[in-house]
Amino acid sequence: MLPSDHFVRMYNELFKMLAERSQEELKDYWLEISTLQEAIIGPHFREKGFQGMFDYWDRIKIEENCDMDLEITENYFEIRMNICPSLSKNLDNDAGLCIQYCDHCAGWINPLMKKIGYFPVYDIISRTEPRCNFRVYISEEKASRFAEGAKLLCDPYGYLDHA
């Protein structure tokens, strides 16, 4: 198993290589991850809704040592990433940051959420600050309202109809 420092750097370098080849190849890579994740966690999200999402990311919080807050409300599930360990590691390496690094989360999560009937909104805040907000709504209208207030909406390939 790769230590997270190496894994994150490998992803960063892979994203840079794919982006240099074409934006379509980078998009296809993230869509492939989305397809795999749909098979693994899609049934859990479909069955348990927001609680399933909370359970999944609560586990990720531990495994990836994330400083994040998770919240379930009547209308949405939210992740407030206070300090993203992945972006932090990539900002602190000598190889340089793939400026699209933050897009990988939305690149695989947004298509999955849309397929199962939810409306995700990523506010990445900044591509060089290791924090973001992510909400998944039941209502497209409420997702659109949240997206209007986002600083830097992350929907790199138009996965969201309302963005």
Image (cartoon, rainbow, N blue to C red):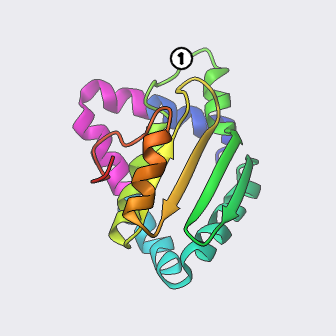
Q: Can residue 112 be spotted in the picture? A: no
**104 or 80, which lies in front?**
80
> Can you tell which quarter of the image residue 132 is in?
top right
Q: Secondary structure at mark 1?
A: loop
Question: What residue does disc 1 label?
Answer: 96
Q: Position of residue 46 (x, y in %)?
A: 47, 80
Q: In which quarter of the view is residue 57 placed?
A: bottom right
Q: Amino acid at mark 1?
A: Gly
Left or right, residue 67 beside residue 2: right
Q: Please, is residue 127 above or below residue 44 in the view? A: above
Please say whether residue 153 is one of the residues in the magenta stretch: no
Task: Examine the rendered structure and indicate whether residue 147 appears above or below residue 118.
Answer: above
Count of residue discs = 1
Q: Position of residue 158 (x, y in %)?
A: 27, 45
Picture coordinates of residue 92 (x, y %)? 67, 20
Task: Decide whether residue 21 is among the magenta residues.
Answer: yes
Q: Nearer the viewer, residue 67 or 73?
A: 73
Where is residue 84? Give x, y as percent.
67, 39
x 53%, y 79%: residue: 44
Residue 142 appears in which quarter of the rendering?
bottom left
Q: Residue at x 43, y 40 (%)?
A: 154
Q: Residues within 10 Å of mark 1 (few under 14, many from 20)?
A: few
Can you see residue 7? Answer: yes
Q: Nearer the viewer, residue 1 or 160?
A: 160
Q: Main secondary structure of the magenta part?
A: helix
Which contiguous range is marked in magenta? Answer: 15-33
Given the current orientation, which residue lies at the most extreme bottom position? 47
The residue drawn where x is 67% and y is 29% is 88
Left or right for 38, reference 95:
left
